[in-house]
């Protein structure tokens, strides 16, 4: 962590990322409120103020994970540690390390936290990590999780298509409640989508013309309006039209 701003856990081995993909905060459109909430919470972390762990939920492609990565722009003392939901027990070891690196502040990113089937172990681990247990929680670590589901379980589980015992459902809601900050991401409007396309045009020095607008709308016709669709469109446009 002294030499890398981003570290990813592969198996049991943390790997430092040499070439990070850190988006700029000004590149995010259509999520101004969400960006403001996460920025303020992250600033509280490195200013030594009270902060909350956060659950970022909503449709795919709306920029949840990218926005978490963009928080690294706020301070040179911030570090990002990405952990898969099935390896959260490693965070107990990580907490020991974080205690020793008090001069740094850490964001733990648990991406795509959707719990299906036998998720009891993950739930128990995360509840202990978020709420504190016999292992002390470092004050320089915040946990940000992303999910396509507000309550961490696919709709068919919550709607009764697949039956959970009531206590399992309550366990999932209990885990969600551990996140003091819950930030929802909705589908982009047409205007948000075109603004995102315009930003990518500026980045790649492409004139934002009526032709580009028409092509962008046609590209999104069988997809959805999102930041990811805007990014994929620009790559498609450069490859096929320029």
Image (tube, rainbow, N blue to C red):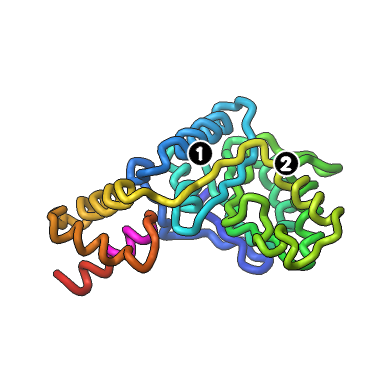
Residue 229 highlighted magenta (yes or no) = yes
Question: What are the residue bounds of the magenta stretch?
Answer: 228-234
The residue to which callout 1 is attached is 77
Looking at the picture, tell me which residue is in the foreground, 142 or 56.
56
Kindly identify the residue that appears in the image at 46 percent across and 47 percent down: 67
Image coordinates for residue 162, horizontal then vertical, percent:
75, 67
Which quadrant would residue 222 be assigned to in this image?
A: bottom left
Question: Is residue 85 highlighted in magenta?
Answer: no
Could you tell me which secondary element the residue under label 1 belongs to?
A: loop
Residue bearing the label numbered 2: 178
Asked whether 47 or 202 is in front, the reply is 202
Quarter of the image holding residue 238? bottom left
CA–CA distance in space, label 1 to label 2: 26 Å
Q: Is residue 89 left or right of residue 65?
A: right
Q: Position of residue 33 (x, y in %)?
A: 45, 35
Height in image: 27 above or below 15? above
The spot of residue 111 in percent (x, y) is 58, 57
28 shown above or below 215: above
């Amino acid at each position: 962590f002294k030499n890398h701003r981003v570290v990813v856990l592969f198996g049991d081995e943390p790997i430092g990322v040499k070439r990070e993909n850190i988006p700029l905060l000004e590149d995010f459109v259509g999520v101004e409120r969400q960006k403001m909430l996460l920025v303020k919470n992250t600033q509280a972390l490195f200013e030594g103020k009270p902060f909350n762990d956060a659950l970022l939920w909503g449709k795919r492609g709306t920029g949840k994970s990218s926005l978490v990565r963009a928080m690294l722009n706020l301070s040179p003392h911030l570090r990002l540690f990405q952990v898969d939901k099935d390896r959260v027990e490693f965070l107990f070891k990580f907490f020991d390390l974080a205690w020793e690196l008090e001069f740094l502040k850490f964001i733990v990113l648990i991406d795509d936290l959707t719990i299906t089937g036998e998720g009891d172990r993950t739930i128990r681990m995360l509840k202990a990590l978020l709420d504190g247990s016999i292992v002390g929680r470092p004050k320089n670590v915040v946990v940000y999780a992303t999910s396509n589901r507000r309550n961490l379980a696919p709709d068919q589980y919550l709607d009764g298509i697949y039956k959970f015992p009531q206590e399992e459902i309550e366990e999932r809601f209990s885990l969600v409640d551990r996140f003091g900050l819950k930030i929802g991401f909705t589908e982009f409007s047409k205007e948000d989508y075109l603004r995102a396309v315009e930003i990518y045009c500026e980045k790649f020095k492409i004139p934002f013309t009526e032709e580009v607008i028409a092509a962008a709308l046609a590209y999104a016709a069988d997809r959805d309006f999102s930041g990811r669709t805007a990014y994929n469109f620009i790559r498609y446009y450069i490859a096929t039209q320029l």
